């Protein structure tokens, strides 16, 4: 599937990520992915992020309120474990390990779909 996304809701983006992974996961791993992605969705929602803009300038600015650039989402995902999983929901060590793996996979997926555009006035 080579469909290029320009902007998706967080829920739709996470669903697209999961759909691409689900066939290669066993039942337990699938459930782990679902659990972690549900928490990622909640965390981003708590941060005021409702959508992800996959086409952003290199300065990272998105076009609409509530829609974050991929760069902004990646920055938030860096803090997901400490700020949310540990501080807010007091996740157990085993779940933190699983969440770290799923989050790392999600970060790679987001970077692979990020369409970078040069800044206005930048020399090519």
Image (cartoon, grey):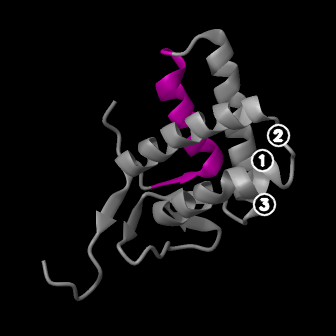
Secondary structure type for disc 2: loop
Q: Answer yes or no: do the residues labelled 1 and 3 have beta carbons within 8 Å?
A: no
Q: Which residues are magenta?
A: 7-24
Q: Nearer the viewer, mark 1 or mark 3?
A: 1
Q: Earlier in the sequence, mark 2 or mark 1?
A: 1
Q: Which residue is mark 2?
A: 91
Q: Is residue 118 magenta?
A: no
Q: Is residue 20 magenta?
A: yes
Mark 2 Cα within 10 Å, few/some/many (few <14, many 20+)? some
For the point 31% across and 36% down, the residue is: 2
Q: Is residue 55 left or right of residue 84?
A: left
Q: Nearer the viewer, mark 3 or mark 2?
A: 2
- Real-space Cα distance between discs 3 and 2? 17 Å
For the point 80% across and 49% down, the residue is: 86
Q: Earlier in the sequence, mark 3 or mark 2?
A: 3
Q: Which residue is mark 3?
A: 46
Q: Which residue is mark 1?
A: 85
Q: Answer yes or no: do the residues labelled 3 and 2 have beta carbons within 8 Å?
A: no
Secondary structure type for disc 3: helix
Q: Give the percent coordinates (x, y) of residue 99.
A: 66, 37
- Real-space Cα distance between discs 2 and 1? 5 Å
Q: Earlier in the sequence, mark 1 or mark 3?
A: 3
């Amino acid at each position: 599937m080579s469909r290029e996304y320009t902007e998706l809701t967080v829920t739709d983006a996470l669903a697209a990520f999961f759909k691409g992974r689900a066939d290669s996961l066993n039942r337990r791993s699938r459930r782990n992915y679902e659990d972690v992605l549900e928490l990622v969705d909640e965390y981003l929602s708590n941060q005021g992020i409702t959508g992800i803009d996959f086409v952003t300038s290199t300065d990272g600015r998105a076009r609409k309120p509530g829609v974050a650039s991929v760069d902004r989402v990646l920055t938030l995902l860096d803090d997901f474990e400490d700020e949310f999983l540990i501080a807010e929901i007091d996740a157990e060590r085993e779940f933190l390990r699983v969440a770290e793996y799923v989050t790392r996979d999600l970060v790679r997926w987001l970077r692979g779909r990020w369409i970078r555009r040069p800044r206005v006035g930048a020399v090519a």
